[in-house]
Image (cartoon, grey):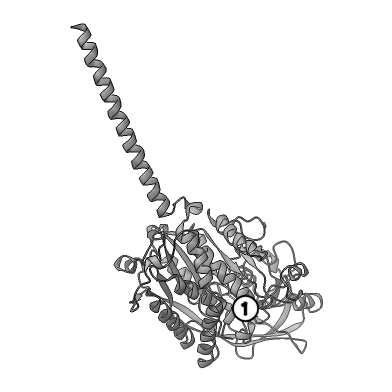
Amino acid sequence: MPKSQSLRVGAAIVAAAGALAFTTIPSSAAPVAAAELPDGPALAKNLVKKVTGAGVNRHLIALQRIADKNGGNRAAGTPGHRQSAEYVEAQLVQAGFDVTRHEFPFTFTQTLAEKLVVAGRTVPISIMTYSLSTPTGGITAPLAVVPVDATPGCEVSDFAGVTGKIALVQRGACSFADKQRNAAEAGAVGAIIYNNVDGGLAGTLTDPANAKLPTGGITKADGEALAASSNGASVTLELRALREDRTSYNVIAQTKTGRKNNVVVAGSHLDSVVAGPGINDNGSGSAALLETAIQLGGSPKVSNAVRFAWWSAEELGLVGSKKYVQSLTFEQQLDIALYLNFDMIASPNTGYFVYDGDNSDNVGAGEGPYGSAQIEAAFHSFLNTTGTPTEGTDFSGRSDYGEFILNGIPAGGLFTGAEGVKTAAQAEKWGGVAGIAYDKNYHGKGDNLGNIDRVALDRNSDAIAWVTASYAISTEDINGVPPRAARAQSRIAGKARMRAQLVHEDETAAAHGAGCIHANELTI
Protein backbone atom coordinates (compact mmCIF):
# COMPACT_ATOMS: atom_id res chain seq x y z
CA MET A 1 0.00 0.00 0.00
CA PRO A 2 1.76 3.37 -0.86
CA LYS A 3 -0.59 4.32 -1.18
CA SER A 4 -11.42 -3.12 -17.17
CA GLN A 5 -14.51 -2.93 -16.44
CA SER A 6 -17.36 -4.27 -17.80
CA LEU A 7 -14.69 -6.69 -18.63
CA ARG A 8 -16.10 -7.22 -21.97
CA VAL A 9 -12.83 -8.61 -23.08
CA GLY A 10 -13.07 -7.83 -26.74
CA ALA A 11 -12.41 -5.33 -29.44
CA ALA A 12 -14.33 -2.50 -27.77
CA ILE A 13 -12.16 -2.51 -24.66
CA VAL A 14 -8.94 -3.12 -26.53
CA ALA A 15 -9.72 -0.09 -28.66
CA ALA A 16 -10.53 1.99 -25.61
CA ALA A 17 -7.33 0.93 -23.89
CA GLY A 18 -5.09 2.05 -26.73
CA ALA A 19 -1.64 0.69 -26.07
CA LEU A 20 -2.80 -1.30 -23.04
CA ALA A 21 -3.05 -4.96 -23.97
CA PHE A 22 -5.56 -7.54 -22.79
CA THR A 23 -4.81 -11.24 -23.04
CA THR A 24 -7.45 -13.81 -22.13
CA ILE A 25 -6.72 -17.08 -20.36
CA PRO A 26 -9.69 -19.39 -21.02
CA SER A 27 -11.25 -21.44 -18.27
CA SER A 28 -10.54 -25.15 -18.47
CA ALA A 29 -12.69 -26.01 -15.47
CA ALA A 30 -16.40 -26.61 -15.64
CA PRO A 31 -18.33 -23.57 -14.39
CA VAL A 32 -20.00 -23.84 -11.02
CA ALA A 33 -23.67 -24.68 -11.43
CA ALA A 34 -25.92 -21.75 -10.57
CA ALA A 35 -28.11 -23.97 -8.40
CA GLU A 36 -25.21 -24.75 -6.06
CA LEU A 37 -25.30 -21.31 -4.46
CA PRO A 38 -28.49 -19.73 -3.10
CA ASP A 39 -29.34 -16.15 -3.80
CA GLY A 40 -30.40 -13.38 -1.44
CA PRO A 41 -29.11 -13.32 2.13
CA ALA A 42 -28.47 -17.06 1.88
CA LEU A 43 -25.71 -16.43 -0.67
CA ALA A 44 -23.85 -14.15 1.72
CA LYS A 45 -24.30 -16.56 4.64
CA ASN A 46 -23.15 -19.50 2.57
CA LEU A 47 -20.10 -17.65 1.26
CA VAL A 48 -19.03 -16.62 4.75
CA LYS A 49 -19.11 -20.29 5.79
CA LYS A 50 -17.04 -21.30 2.77
CA VAL A 51 -14.39 -18.59 3.05
CA THR A 52 -12.26 -19.83 5.95
CA GLY A 53 -9.15 -18.45 7.57
CA ALA A 54 -7.36 -21.69 6.73
CA GLY A 55 -8.24 -21.34 3.06
CA VAL A 56 -7.01 -17.75 2.95
CA ASN A 57 -3.83 -18.64 4.84
CA ARG A 58 -2.95 -21.31 2.29
CA HIS A 59 -2.71 -18.60 -0.36
CA LEU A 60 -0.41 -16.58 1.93
CA ILE A 61 1.88 -19.59 2.24
CA ALA A 62 2.01 -19.79 -1.56
CA LEU A 63 2.90 -16.08 -1.85
CA GLN A 64 5.63 -16.42 0.78
CA ARG A 65 7.21 -19.34 -1.07
CA ILE A 66 7.06 -17.44 -4.36
CA ALA A 67 8.84 -14.49 -2.73
CA ASP A 68 11.45 -16.78 -1.18
CA LYS A 69 12.24 -18.23 -4.61
CA ASN A 70 12.59 -14.78 -6.16
CA GLY A 71 14.97 -12.70 -4.10
CA GLY A 72 12.58 -12.15 -1.19
CA ASN A 73 9.96 -10.00 -2.91
CA ARG A 74 7.02 -9.96 -5.33
CA ALA A 75 7.48 -6.44 -6.71
CA ALA A 76 5.81 -5.34 -9.95
CA GLY A 77 7.93 -6.00 -13.00
CA THR A 78 9.87 -8.84 -11.33
CA PRO A 79 9.62 -12.64 -11.54
CA GLY A 80 8.13 -12.67 -8.03
CA HIS A 81 5.10 -10.68 -9.13
CA ARG A 82 4.71 -12.61 -12.38
CA GLN A 83 4.66 -15.94 -10.53
CA SER A 84 2.23 -14.52 -7.94
CA ALA A 85 -0.09 -13.48 -10.77
CA GLU A 86 0.23 -16.87 -12.44
CA TYR A 87 -0.70 -18.55 -9.15
CA VAL A 88 -3.82 -16.37 -8.82
CA GLU A 89 -4.75 -17.04 -12.46
CA ALA A 90 -4.45 -20.79 -12.09
CA GLN A 91 -6.68 -20.79 -9.00
CA LEU A 92 -9.31 -18.69 -10.77
CA VAL A 93 -9.33 -20.83 -13.91
CA GLN A 94 -9.84 -23.91 -11.74
CA ALA A 95 -12.80 -22.15 -10.11
CA GLY A 96 -14.47 -21.62 -13.48
CA PHE A 97 -13.47 -18.07 -14.40
CA ASP A 98 -12.16 -16.74 -17.67
CA VAL A 99 -9.13 -14.72 -16.60
CA THR A 100 -7.95 -11.55 -18.30
CA ARG A 101 -4.55 -9.89 -18.17
CA HIS A 102 -4.59 -6.10 -18.43
CA GLU A 103 -1.06 -5.03 -19.35
CA PHE A 104 0.43 -1.57 -18.88
CA PRO A 105 3.80 0.23 -18.86
CA PHE A 106 5.25 1.73 -15.68
CA THR A 107 8.49 3.04 -14.21
CA PHE A 108 10.19 0.46 -12.01
CA THR A 109 12.19 1.77 -9.06
CA GLN A 110 14.52 -0.02 -6.66
CA THR A 111 16.30 1.59 -3.72
CA LEU A 112 20.10 1.58 -3.92
CA ALA A 113 21.04 3.91 -1.04
CA GLU A 114 19.27 5.63 1.89
CA LYS A 115 21.51 7.64 4.18
CA LEU A 116 21.28 10.83 6.23
CA VAL A 117 24.23 11.90 8.39
CA VAL A 118 24.02 14.88 10.77
CA ALA A 119 27.06 15.82 12.89
CA GLY A 120 28.44 12.31 12.49
CA ARG A 121 25.17 10.68 13.54
CA THR A 122 23.20 8.53 11.10
CA VAL A 123 19.46 9.24 11.01
CA PRO A 124 17.23 6.55 9.45
CA ILE A 125 15.61 7.81 6.25
CA SER A 126 13.45 6.28 3.50
CA ILE A 127 13.68 7.44 -0.09
CA MET A 128 10.30 8.42 -1.50
CA THR A 129 9.04 6.55 -4.53
CA TYR A 130 10.00 8.40 -7.72
CA SER A 131 12.45 10.66 -5.85
CA LEU A 132 15.38 11.94 -7.86
CA SER A 133 18.70 10.37 -6.91
CA THR A 134 21.74 12.05 -5.43
CA PRO A 135 25.21 11.31 -6.80
CA THR A 136 26.98 8.28 -5.29
CA GLY A 137 28.25 9.41 -1.92
CA GLY A 138 25.40 11.89 -1.55
CA ILE A 139 25.23 15.68 -1.30
CA THR A 140 26.50 17.74 1.62
CA ALA A 141 24.82 21.05 2.39
CA PRO A 142 23.42 23.09 5.29
CA LEU A 143 20.07 22.03 6.75
CA ALA A 144 17.27 24.60 6.37
CA VAL A 145 14.36 24.11 8.78
CA VAL A 146 11.00 25.20 7.35
CA PRO A 147 8.79 26.79 10.05
CA VAL A 148 5.72 24.79 11.04
CA ASP A 149 2.33 26.39 10.40
CA ALA A 150 -1.12 25.17 9.32
CA THR A 151 0.23 24.37 5.82
CA PRO A 152 3.95 23.63 6.23
CA GLY A 153 5.82 23.70 2.92
CA CYS A 154 2.65 24.10 0.87
CA GLU A 155 3.69 27.50 -0.54
CA VAL A 156 7.00 28.42 -2.17
CA SER A 157 7.23 31.35 0.27
CA ASP A 158 7.59 28.83 3.14
CA PHE A 159 11.08 28.01 1.85
CA ALA A 160 12.72 31.42 2.24
CA GLY A 161 16.50 31.17 2.50
CA VAL A 162 16.82 27.54 1.35
CA THR A 163 18.87 28.18 -1.80
CA GLY A 164 21.68 25.64 -1.95
CA LYS A 165 20.44 23.92 1.20
CA ILE A 166 18.58 20.74 2.17
CA ALA A 167 15.08 21.63 3.34
CA LEU A 168 13.52 19.97 6.41
CA VAL A 169 9.72 20.24 6.39
CA GLN A 170 6.89 18.68 8.38
CA ARG A 171 4.32 16.38 6.75
CA GLY A 172 0.73 17.56 6.38
CA ALA A 173 -1.82 19.75 4.53
CA CYS A 174 -0.48 19.06 1.03
CA SER A 175 1.24 16.23 -0.83
CA PHE A 176 4.86 15.21 -0.55
CA ALA A 177 5.19 16.07 -4.23
CA ASP A 178 3.98 19.64 -3.59
CA LYS A 179 6.42 20.16 -0.72
CA GLN A 180 9.51 19.05 -2.65
CA ARG A 181 8.38 20.95 -5.76
CA ASN A 182 8.07 24.16 -3.74
CA ALA A 183 11.46 23.51 -2.15
CA ALA A 184 13.00 23.04 -5.60
CA GLU A 185 11.46 26.25 -6.90
CA ALA A 186 12.97 28.08 -3.90
CA GLY A 187 16.44 26.72 -4.77
CA ALA A 188 16.85 23.78 -2.36
CA VAL A 189 19.11 20.88 -3.38
CA GLY A 190 17.27 18.21 -1.38
CA ALA A 191 14.17 17.70 0.78
CA ILE A 192 13.58 15.80 4.01
CA ILE A 193 9.97 15.42 5.16
CA TYR A 194 9.35 14.37 8.75
CA ASN A 195 6.20 12.68 10.00
CA ASN A 196 3.48 14.52 11.90
CA VAL A 197 2.50 11.36 13.78
CA ASP A 198 4.67 8.79 15.51
CA GLY A 199 6.40 6.26 13.29
CA GLY A 200 8.44 6.19 10.11
CA LEU A 201 7.51 7.84 6.84
CA ALA A 202 7.63 5.85 3.59
CA GLY A 203 5.96 8.01 0.96
CA THR A 204 5.55 8.44 -2.77
CA LEU A 205 5.70 11.41 -5.12
CA THR A 206 2.92 9.61 -7.03
CA ASP A 207 4.39 10.02 -10.52
CA PRO A 208 7.91 10.28 -12.00
CA ALA A 209 6.95 13.63 -13.56
CA ASN A 210 6.51 15.10 -10.06
CA ALA A 211 10.11 14.47 -9.00
CA LYS A 212 12.15 17.65 -8.66
CA LEU A 213 14.56 16.84 -5.80
CA PRO A 214 16.09 13.93 -3.92
CA THR A 215 13.41 13.48 -1.23
CA GLY A 216 13.21 11.22 1.80
CA GLY A 217 11.05 10.68 4.88
CA ILE A 218 12.03 10.41 8.55
CA THR A 219 10.19 9.91 11.84
CA LYS A 220 8.44 12.65 13.77
CA ALA A 221 10.89 12.28 16.66
CA ASP A 222 13.97 12.59 14.44
CA GLY A 223 12.48 15.48 12.51
CA GLU A 224 11.56 17.46 15.60
CA ALA A 225 15.02 16.83 17.08
CA LEU A 226 16.72 18.10 13.91
CA ALA A 227 14.42 21.11 13.73
CA ALA A 228 15.24 22.02 17.32
CA SER A 229 19.02 21.62 17.19
CA SER A 230 20.39 21.38 13.67
CA ASN A 231 19.16 24.38 11.66
CA GLY A 232 22.12 25.46 9.55
CA ALA A 233 24.19 22.37 10.41
CA SER A 234 26.03 20.57 7.62
CA VAL A 235 24.29 17.33 6.66
CA THR A 236 24.98 14.63 4.09
CA LEU A 237 22.05 13.15 2.22
CA GLU A 238 22.37 10.12 -0.05
CA LEU A 239 19.23 8.83 -1.73
CA ARG A 240 19.66 6.70 -4.83
CA ALA A 241 17.27 4.44 -6.74
CA LEU A 242 17.28 2.48 -9.97
CA ARG A 243 14.59 3.69 -12.38
CA GLU A 244 13.70 1.97 -15.63
CA ASP A 245 10.67 1.42 -17.88
CA ARG A 246 9.01 -1.98 -17.53
CA THR A 247 5.61 -3.60 -18.12
CA SER A 248 3.33 -5.45 -15.74
CA TYR A 249 -0.29 -6.52 -15.68
CA ASN A 250 -3.42 -6.64 -13.56
CA VAL A 251 -5.30 -9.92 -13.20
CA ILE A 252 -9.05 -9.61 -13.85
CA ALA A 253 -11.79 -12.25 -13.49
CA GLN A 254 -15.55 -11.71 -13.76
CA THR A 255 -18.43 -14.05 -13.04
CA LYS A 256 -20.17 -15.42 -16.13
CA THR A 257 -23.54 -14.75 -14.48
CA GLY A 258 -25.20 -11.55 -13.36
CA ARG A 259 -25.87 -8.21 -15.03
CA LYS A 260 -22.96 -6.94 -17.07
CA ASN A 261 -24.13 -3.34 -16.80
CA ASN A 262 -24.25 -3.19 -12.98
CA VAL A 263 -21.01 -4.86 -11.94
CA VAL A 264 -19.63 -5.14 -8.41
CA VAL A 265 -15.85 -4.69 -8.59
CA ALA A 266 -13.61 -5.89 -5.74
CA GLY A 267 -9.86 -5.38 -5.85
CA SER A 268 -6.56 -5.78 -4.01
CA HIS A 269 -3.01 -5.04 -5.09
CA LEU A 270 -0.87 -8.11 -5.56
CA ASP A 271 2.59 -6.52 -5.78
CA SER A 272 4.95 -6.06 -2.82
CA VAL A 273 7.69 -3.53 -2.30
CA VAL A 274 11.20 -4.59 -3.33
CA ALA A 275 12.30 -4.69 0.31
CA GLY A 276 10.18 -7.67 1.34
CA PRO A 277 7.66 -10.39 0.49
CA GLY A 278 4.60 -8.25 1.27
CA ILE A 279 2.53 -10.88 3.07
CA ASN A 280 0.39 -8.38 4.99
CA ASP A 281 0.87 -5.61 2.39
CA ASN A 282 -0.83 -6.88 0.44
CA GLY A 283 -0.81 -10.64 0.39
CA SER A 284 -3.54 -10.48 3.04
CA GLY A 285 -6.06 -8.57 0.92
CA SER A 286 -5.12 -10.50 -2.22
CA ALA A 287 -5.46 -13.89 -0.52
CA ALA A 288 -8.86 -13.07 1.02
CA LEU A 289 -10.11 -11.78 -2.32
CA LEU A 290 -8.86 -14.90 -4.08
CA GLU A 291 -10.54 -17.27 -1.64
CA THR A 292 -13.77 -15.26 -1.92
CA ALA A 293 -13.66 -15.59 -5.72
CA ILE A 294 -12.87 -19.30 -5.58
CA GLN A 295 -15.70 -20.08 -3.17
CA LEU A 296 -18.17 -17.88 -5.06
CA GLY A 297 -17.26 -19.62 -8.30
CA GLY A 298 -17.35 -18.46 -11.88
CA SER A 299 -21.11 -18.95 -12.42
CA PRO A 300 -22.98 -18.22 -9.18
CA LYS A 301 -26.66 -17.37 -9.02
CA VAL A 302 -26.33 -13.59 -8.69
CA SER A 303 -28.21 -10.55 -9.92
CA ASN A 304 -25.06 -8.53 -10.65
CA ALA A 305 -21.79 -9.78 -12.10
CA VAL A 306 -18.80 -9.62 -9.76
CA ARG A 307 -15.43 -8.55 -11.16
CA PHE A 308 -12.34 -9.43 -9.13
CA ALA A 309 -9.10 -7.50 -9.73
CA TRP A 310 -5.54 -8.00 -8.52
CA TRP A 311 -3.70 -4.75 -9.26
CA SER A 312 -0.01 -4.43 -10.00
CA ALA A 313 2.44 -1.54 -9.41
CA GLU A 314 0.31 -0.14 -6.60
CA GLU A 315 3.48 0.33 -4.59
CA LEU A 316 4.83 2.58 -7.34
CA GLY A 317 1.99 5.08 -7.35
CA LEU A 318 -1.26 3.08 -7.75
CA VAL A 319 -0.30 2.59 -11.38
CA GLY A 320 -2.23 -0.58 -12.27
CA SER A 321 -5.62 0.56 -10.99
CA LYS A 322 -5.18 4.03 -12.49
CA LYS A 323 -4.28 2.66 -15.90
CA TYR A 324 -7.21 0.28 -15.77
CA VAL A 325 -9.90 2.80 -14.89
CA GLN A 326 -8.44 5.31 -17.36
CA SER A 327 -8.60 2.69 -20.12
CA LEU A 328 -12.40 2.52 -19.83
CA THR A 329 -14.85 4.65 -21.73
CA PHE A 330 -17.45 6.59 -19.77
CA GLU A 331 -20.07 3.98 -20.70
CA GLN A 332 -17.81 1.19 -19.44
CA GLN A 333 -17.31 3.07 -16.18
CA LEU A 334 -21.10 3.39 -15.89
CA ASP A 335 -21.27 -0.40 -15.96
CA ILE A 336 -19.53 -0.39 -12.55
CA ALA A 337 -21.97 -0.14 -9.65
CA LEU A 338 -19.31 0.21 -6.94
CA TYR A 339 -15.72 -0.62 -6.00
CA LEU A 340 -14.55 -2.53 -2.89
CA ASN A 341 -10.88 -2.21 -1.85
CA PHE A 342 -8.90 -4.52 0.43
CA ASP A 343 -5.35 -3.39 1.19
CA MET A 344 -3.75 -4.78 4.39
CA ILE A 345 -6.40 -6.68 6.38
CA ALA A 346 -4.23 -8.59 8.90
CA SER A 347 -1.73 -6.16 10.44
CA PRO A 348 -0.01 -7.76 13.44
CA ASN A 349 -1.04 -4.96 15.85
CA THR A 350 -4.34 -4.75 14.07
CA GLY A 351 -6.97 -2.06 13.92
CA TYR A 352 -10.40 -2.70 12.39
CA PHE A 353 -10.88 0.23 10.05
CA VAL A 354 -13.58 0.87 7.44
CA TYR A 355 -13.13 3.60 4.82
CA ASP A 356 -15.09 6.68 5.88
CA GLY A 357 -17.47 7.01 2.94
CA ASP A 358 -19.67 9.72 4.47
CA ASN A 359 -16.82 11.74 6.06
CA SER A 360 -18.53 11.43 9.43
CA ASP A 361 -15.09 11.45 11.07
CA ASN A 362 -14.35 14.81 9.41
CA VAL A 363 -10.70 13.88 8.92
CA GLY A 364 -8.66 14.55 5.79
CA ALA A 365 -10.44 14.03 2.49
CA GLY A 366 -14.18 14.59 2.10
CA GLU A 367 -16.90 12.04 1.56
CA GLY A 368 -16.78 9.59 -1.32
CA PRO A 369 -19.17 9.56 -4.29
CA TYR A 370 -22.82 8.81 -3.51
CA GLY A 371 -23.10 5.20 -2.34
CA SER A 372 -19.79 5.23 -0.44
CA ALA A 373 -21.60 5.91 2.83
CA GLN A 374 -23.83 2.88 2.26
CA ILE A 375 -20.78 0.68 1.59
CA GLU A 376 -19.18 1.92 4.81
CA ALA A 377 -22.36 1.11 6.73
CA ALA A 378 -22.47 -2.41 5.27
CA PHE A 379 -18.97 -3.23 6.54
CA HIS A 380 -19.54 -1.61 9.94
CA SER A 381 -22.81 -3.50 10.32
CA PHE A 382 -21.37 -6.92 9.52
CA LEU A 383 -18.29 -6.58 11.73
CA ASN A 384 -20.15 -4.95 14.62
CA THR A 385 -22.94 -7.53 14.50
CA THR A 386 -20.42 -10.38 14.56
CA GLY A 387 -18.64 -8.92 17.58
CA THR A 388 -15.87 -6.74 16.15
CA PRO A 389 -15.99 -2.99 16.90
CA THR A 390 -14.77 -0.75 14.09
CA GLU A 391 -13.56 2.76 13.37
CA GLY A 392 -13.54 4.87 10.23
CA THR A 393 -10.41 5.66 8.25
CA ASP A 394 -9.93 8.46 5.77
CA PHE A 395 -9.90 8.14 1.98
CA SER A 396 -6.30 9.35 2.14
CA GLY A 397 -5.50 8.50 -1.49
CA ARG A 398 -2.99 5.83 -0.53
CA SER A 399 -4.68 2.84 -2.17
CA ASP A 400 -6.43 1.70 -5.32
CA TYR A 401 -9.85 3.21 -4.63
CA GLY A 402 -8.41 6.59 -5.71
CA GLU A 403 -9.09 6.48 -9.45
CA PHE A 404 -12.54 5.00 -8.94
CA ILE A 405 -13.52 7.84 -6.60
CA LEU A 406 -12.04 10.40 -8.99
CA ASN A 407 -14.43 9.12 -11.67
CA GLY A 408 -17.50 9.24 -9.44
CA ILE A 409 -17.68 5.51 -8.65
CA PRO A 410 -18.73 4.80 -5.03
CA ALA A 411 -16.08 2.96 -3.06
CA GLY A 412 -15.31 1.45 0.31
CA GLY A 413 -13.36 -1.30 1.99
CA LEU A 414 -11.25 -2.49 4.90
CA PHE A 415 -7.84 -1.61 6.35
CA THR A 416 -6.01 -2.76 9.49
CA GLY A 417 -3.33 -0.06 9.67
CA ALA A 418 0.18 0.52 8.38
CA GLU A 419 2.87 2.76 9.93
CA GLY A 420 0.36 4.66 12.10
CA VAL A 421 0.50 4.10 15.85
CA LYS A 422 -2.21 2.34 17.88
CA THR A 423 -3.73 4.46 20.64
CA ALA A 424 -4.42 3.34 24.19
CA ALA A 425 -8.17 3.45 23.52
CA GLN A 426 -7.73 1.24 20.46
CA ALA A 427 -5.61 -1.26 22.39
CA GLU A 428 -8.35 -1.39 25.03
CA LYS A 429 -10.95 -2.03 22.35
CA TRP A 430 -9.06 -4.37 20.00
CA GLY A 431 -6.17 -5.73 22.01
CA GLY A 432 -2.59 -5.37 20.90
CA VAL A 433 -0.04 -2.84 22.10
CA ALA A 434 -0.57 0.90 22.38
CA GLY A 435 2.20 3.23 21.27
CA ILE A 436 3.57 1.11 18.42
CA ALA A 437 2.67 0.82 14.74
CA TYR A 438 -0.21 -1.31 13.51
CA ASP A 439 2.40 -2.97 11.29
CA LYS A 440 5.96 -2.49 12.54
CA ASN A 441 7.22 -4.35 9.44
CA TYR A 442 5.36 -2.13 6.98
CA HIS A 443 7.27 -2.02 3.67
CA GLY A 444 10.07 -4.06 5.22
CA LYS A 445 11.79 -7.41 5.01
CA GLY A 446 9.87 -8.59 8.06
CA ASP A 447 6.49 -8.49 6.31
CA ASN A 448 6.34 -12.27 6.13
CA LEU A 449 4.14 -15.12 7.34
CA GLY A 450 5.01 -14.20 10.92
CA ASN A 451 3.64 -10.69 10.39
CA ILE A 452 -0.03 -11.69 10.24
CA ASP A 453 -2.85 -11.42 12.79
CA ARG A 454 -4.81 -14.48 11.72
CA VAL A 455 -7.84 -13.61 13.82
CA ALA A 456 -8.10 -10.31 11.92
CA LEU A 457 -7.47 -12.16 8.67
CA ASP A 458 -10.39 -14.50 9.35
CA ARG A 459 -12.78 -11.78 10.54
CA ASN A 460 -12.06 -9.45 7.65
CA SER A 461 -12.25 -12.28 5.12
CA ASP A 462 -15.75 -13.01 6.42
CA ALA A 463 -16.67 -9.35 5.99
CA ILE A 464 -15.31 -9.34 2.43
CA ALA A 465 -17.36 -12.44 1.58
CA TRP A 466 -20.54 -11.05 3.15
CA VAL A 467 -20.48 -7.59 1.59
CA THR A 468 -19.34 -8.77 -1.84
CA ALA A 469 -22.08 -11.42 -1.99
CA SER A 470 -24.71 -9.02 -0.68
CA TYR A 471 -24.02 -6.49 -3.43
CA ALA A 472 -23.90 -9.30 -5.98
CA ILE A 473 -27.58 -9.77 -5.14
CA SER A 474 -28.65 -6.13 -4.89
CA THR A 475 -27.16 -2.65 -5.21
CA GLU A 476 -30.53 -0.98 -4.64
CA ASP A 477 -29.22 1.12 -1.73
CA ILE A 478 -26.28 2.26 -3.85
CA ASN A 479 -27.87 3.13 -7.18
CA GLY A 480 -31.51 2.05 -7.09
CA VAL A 481 -31.00 -1.16 -9.10
CA PRO A 482 -33.10 -3.87 -7.38
CA PRO A 483 -32.30 -7.57 -7.28
CA ARG A 484 -33.49 -9.47 -10.30
CA ALA A 485 -35.88 -11.58 -8.26
CA ALA A 486 -37.59 -8.47 -6.93
CA ARG A 487 -37.75 -6.97 -10.38
CA ALA A 488 -39.24 -10.20 -11.76
CA GLN A 489 -41.83 -10.25 -8.99
CA SER A 490 -42.62 -6.62 -9.73
CA ARG A 491 -43.16 -7.47 -13.40
CA ILE A 492 -45.41 -10.42 -12.50
CA ALA A 493 -47.41 -8.26 -10.11
CA GLY A 494 -47.63 -5.55 -12.76
CA LYS A 495 -48.93 -8.00 -15.34
CA ALA A 496 -51.47 -9.35 -12.83
CA ARG A 497 -52.68 -5.80 -12.14
CA MET A 498 -52.93 -5.16 -15.88
CA ARG A 499 -54.94 -8.34 -16.43
CA ALA A 500 -57.23 -7.44 -13.55
CA GLN A 501 -57.69 -3.95 -14.99
CA LEU A 502 -58.50 -5.35 -18.42
CA VAL A 503 -61.04 -7.77 -16.91
CA HIS A 504 -62.57 -4.91 -14.97
CA GLU A 505 -62.76 -2.76 -18.10
CA ASP A 506 -64.34 -5.62 -20.07
CA GLU A 507 -66.93 -6.18 -17.35
CA THR A 508 -67.67 -2.47 -17.17
CA ALA A 509 -68.00 -2.23 -20.93
CA ALA A 510 -70.35 -5.23 -21.00
CA ALA A 511 -72.50 -3.77 -18.25
CA HIS A 512 -72.54 -0.41 -19.98
CA GLY A 513 -73.54 -2.05 -23.27
CA ALA A 514 -76.44 -3.94 -21.67
CA GLY A 515 -77.73 -0.73 -20.14
CA CYS A 516 -77.77 1.05 -23.50
CA ILE A 517 -79.83 -1.68 -25.13
CA HIS A 518 -82.40 -1.49 -22.37
CA ALA A 519 -82.68 2.26 -22.80
CA ASN A 520 -83.13 1.95 -26.53
CA GLU A 521 -85.88 -0.56 -26.01
CA LEU A 522 -87.72 1.87 -23.76
CA THR A 523 -87.65 4.65 -26.32
CA ILE A 524 -88.99 2.66 -29.18
Q: Is residue 489 above or below residue 145?
A: above
The quarter in which the C terminus is drawn is: top left
Residue, x 61% and y 57% (percent of image)?
366
Query: Which residue of the protein is positioned furthest toward the right in this rendering?
Result: 229
Q: Nearer the viewer, residue 250 or 96?
A: 96
Q: In this view, does 335 lie above or below 278?
A: above
Specify few, some or many for label 1: CA neighbours under 10 Å numbering under 14, 14-19, or 20 or more: many
The quarter in which the N terminus is drawn is: bottom right
- Is residue 171 found left or right of 104 in the rendered image? right
- Is residue 253 found left or right of 422 in the rendered image? left
- Is residue 250 found left or right of 279 in the rendered image? left
Total numbered labels placed on residues in the image: 1
Residue, x 33% and y 37% (percent of image)?
498
Q: Position of residue 228 (x, y in %)?
A: 81, 75
Q: Nearer the viewer, residue 294 or 335?
A: 294
Secondary structure at numbered mark 1: helix
- Please give the residue where the numbered disc 1 appears in the rendered image: 454
Residue 340 in sight: no
Q: Nearer the viewer, residue 46 or 390?
A: 46
Query: Which residue of the protein is positioned furthest toward the top in this rendering?
Result: 524
Q: Where is residue 410 in the image (x, y as percent from the top left)?
A: 51, 58
Q: Nearer the viewer, residue 336 or 79?
A: 336
Q: In which quarter of the image is residue 116?
A: bottom right
The amino acid beneath tag 1 is: Arg
Residue 61 in sight: yes
Q: Position of residue 279 (x, y in %)?
A: 57, 82
Residue, x 75% and y 71% (percent of image)?
427
Q: In this view, does 11 lie above or below 491?
A: below
